[in-house]
Image: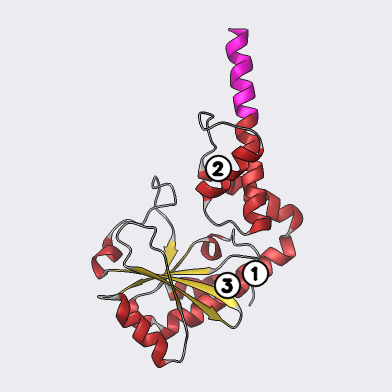
């Protein structure tokens, strides 16, 4: 029995260390994918593939703690700028039912984060045409999510914005987190306006 407790304790300590290291990578190096951050953190700590990795919620908790200790003012300003930028883009592309999601919405965005916006269109070409009609250049990114039609990256006054374009039926489906267990938060423009008002900006 003592051996089992010892092994469990060691595993728990390693899990916490990986979560902390992953949070630091996300805060300092701009890694936005939880899976990539935890795998890189695990390798850096000499953990093997068979070791239990922390859940995304554990990393998010460590990330919030790290930001509050080392990046509080900078991070708060960054979140505000991302939300304000997202609102402008959402208003410009309102015909595509935009939602804000990701770190700008939940408050974990860091210095390298982009404003993440979900759009719903019959074709990604419709969004591309809308951007071009306003003189906005964009880059086409690799697809990484189920049902995702396309991802476009734009620069809005030196703030990166990532547009994820889905077919209209996807708007009615329950959004997921990075790990697919719980509902992923997303918000319409009126909610973003309220968030900006709450911060006094």
Depth check: give the residue in front, 183 or 161.
Answer: 161
The N terminus lies in quadrant: top right
Give the foreground label among 2 and 1.
2
Callout 2–callout 3 Cβ contact below 8 Å: no
Element assignment for label 1: helix
From the viewer's perspective, tell me whether residue 77 is left or right of residue 198: right
Which badge, 2 or 3, is on the more N-terminal residue? Answer: 2
In the picture, the disc for residue 78 is: 1
| Residue sitting at x 50%, y 47% | 35
> On the picture, is 12 further left or further right than 135?
right
Q: What residue is shown with label 3? A: 82
Residue 13, quarter of the rendered image: top right
Q: Which residue is mark 2?
A: 39
Q: Residues within 10 Å of mark 1 (few under 14, many from 20)?
A: many
Q: How many angstroms separate mark 2 from mark 1 (CA)?
A: 26 Å
Q: Earlier in the sequence, mark 2 or mark 1?
A: 2
In front: 68, or 141?
Answer: 141
Q: CA distance from mark 2 to mark 3?
A: 27 Å
Distance Cα–Cα, label 3 vs label 1: 6 Å
- The majority secondary structure of the magenta stretch comes to helix
- Residue 3: in magenta span: yes
Cβ–Cβ under 8 Å for marks 3 and 1: yes
Residue 5 placement: quadrant: top right
Residue name at image x 68 percent, y 64 percent = 75
**Around disc 2, counting alpha carbons within 10 Å, would you say few (fewer than 14), some (14 to 19), or many (20 or more)?**
some
Residue 139, position as x, y percentages in the image: 46, 76
Q: Is residue 27 left or right of residue 83?
A: right
Where is residue 164 shown, x and y percent of the image?
A: 40, 68
Indicate the secondary structure of the residue bearing disc 2: helix
Marks 2 and 1 close (CB-CB < 8 Å): no
Magenta span covers which residues?
1-13
Q: Secondary structure at mark 3?
A: helix
């Amino acid at each position: 029995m003592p051996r089992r407790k010892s092994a469990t304790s060691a595993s728990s300590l390693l899990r916490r260390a990986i979560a902390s290291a992953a949070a630091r990578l996300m805060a300092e190096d701009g890694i936005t994918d939880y899976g990539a951050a935890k795998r890189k953190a695990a390798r850096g700590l000499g953990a093997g593939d068979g070791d239990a990795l922390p859940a995304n919620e554990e990393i998010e908790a460590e990330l919030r703690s790290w930001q509050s200790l080392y990046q509080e003012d900078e991070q708060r300003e960054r979140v505000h700028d991302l939300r304000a930028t997202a609102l402008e883009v959402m208003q410009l592309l309102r015909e595509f039912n935009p939602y804000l999601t990701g770190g700008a919405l939940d408050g974990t965005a860091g210095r390298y984060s982009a404003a993440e916006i979900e759009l719903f269109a019959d074709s990604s070409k419709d969004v591309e045409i809308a951007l071009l009609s306003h003189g906005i250049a964009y880059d086409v990114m690799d697809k990484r999510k189920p049902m995702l039609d396309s991802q476009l990256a734009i620069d809005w006054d030196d703030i990166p914005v990532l547009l994820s374009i889905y077919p209209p039926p996807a708007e009615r489906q329950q959004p997921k987190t990075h790990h697919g267990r719980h509902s992923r938060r997303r918000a319409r423009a009126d909610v973003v306006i309220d968030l900006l008002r709450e911060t006094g900006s």
